[in-house]
Image: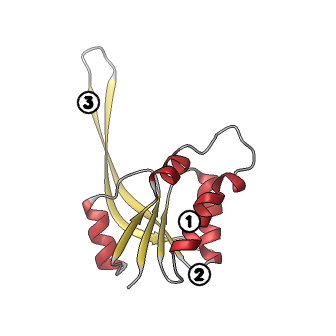
C-alpha cells in the first residue's frame, strides 16, 4: 500500500484523511518533520531563486518515499511547481486537495459586510504534466 507524504501548511482534516485512505488507498500518512515544516511555511518572498532553499525537503522526500507513493503538495506557487516536478522525477504521484467554497455575507451595523468562508474538502486531484 502506498504512503501519503504531506508537504503543505495545514493539518490534514478528518475528511481528507478518510478520502486519502479510501480513494487513494494509502496506509500511512507522513508529515514533514517540524524543522522542514517551518521551512515550507516560510518560503522567502524576496528571494528570486528558491531551488536551493527547498533542497532539504527534496532530500527528505527522496530518502523516505518510494516510487508509487503520493505527495500532497500545496503552498507557495513556485515552491509547489518545483516540488511537483521533483516528485515526478522520483516516480511519486503528486496531488492537491480540491475544496468546495461557500461564502456567507453578514451585513454589520456600521454598514460593512462580514464575509465568512467555509471550505469543504472534496477530492485529491493528481497534478498533470
Q: Nearer the viewer, mark 2 or mark 3?
A: 2
Crowd class of label 1 (few under 14; some 14 to 19; many from 20; radius 10 Å): few
Q: Residue furthest right?
A: 48
Q: Is residue 82 above or below residue 126?
A: above
> Mark 3 or 1 closer to N-term?
1
Q: Is residue 33 left or right of residue 52?
A: left
Q: CA distance from mark 2 to mark 3?
A: 47 Å
Q: Residue furthest bottom?
A: 1
Q: In the rendering, which numbered label is found on residue 82?
A: none
Residue at x-position 38% and y-position 85%: 1
Q: Earlier in the sequence, mark 1 or mark 2?
A: 1
Crowd around label 3: few <14 · some 14–19 · many ≥20 (10 Å): few
Judging by the rendered image, the residue that carries numbered circle 3 is 106
Q: Which residue is found at the position 48% from the left and 52% from the top?
A: 37
The quarter of the image holding the C terminus is bottom right
Residue 61's quadrant in the figure? Answer: bottom right
Label 2 CA crowd tier, 10 Å (few <14, some 14–19, many 20+): some
Which comes before the other along the chain, label 2 or label 3? Answer: 2
Q: Which residue is drawn at the image coordinates 24% and 16% (left, top)?
A: 109
The CA span between labels 1 and 2 is 15 Å
Identify which residue is drawn at 50% across, 57% down. 74
Residue at the disc numbered 2: 91
Q: Which residue is mark 1?
A: 60
Disc 3 element = strand
From the top left corner, tell me how far across and down residue 54 is, in percent: 64, 56
- Residue 96 position, x and y percent, is 46, 64
Q: CB of mark 3 within 8 Å of CB of mark 1?
A: no
The reply to whether dot 2 and dot 3 touch (C-beta < 8 Å) is no
Q: Position of residue 76 (x, y in %)?
A: 57, 50
Q: CA distance from mark 3 to mark 1?
A: 45 Å
Amino acid at each position: 500500500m502506498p504512503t501519503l507524504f504531506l508537504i503543505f501548511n495545514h493539518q490534514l482534516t478528518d475528511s481528507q484523511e478518510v478520502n486519502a485512505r479510501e480513494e487513494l488507498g494509502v496506509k500511512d500518512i507522513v508529515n514533514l518533520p517540524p524543522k522542514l515544516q517551518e521551512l515550507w511555511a516560510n518560503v522567502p518572498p524576496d528571494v528570486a531563486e528558491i531551488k536551493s532553499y527547498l533542497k532539504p525537503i527534496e532530500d527528505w522526500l527522496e530518502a523516505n518515499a518510494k516510487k508509487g507513493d503520493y505527495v500532497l503538495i500545496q503552498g507557495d506557487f513556485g515552491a509547489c511547481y518545483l516540488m511537483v516536478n521533483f516528485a515526478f522525477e522520483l516516480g511519486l504521484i503528486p496531488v492537491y486537495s480540491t475544496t468546495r467554497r461557500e461564502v456567507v455575507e453578514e451585513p454589520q451595523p456600521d454598514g460593512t459586510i462580514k464575509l465568512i468562508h467555509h471550505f469543504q474538502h472534496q477530492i485529491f486531484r493528481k497534478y498533470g504534466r
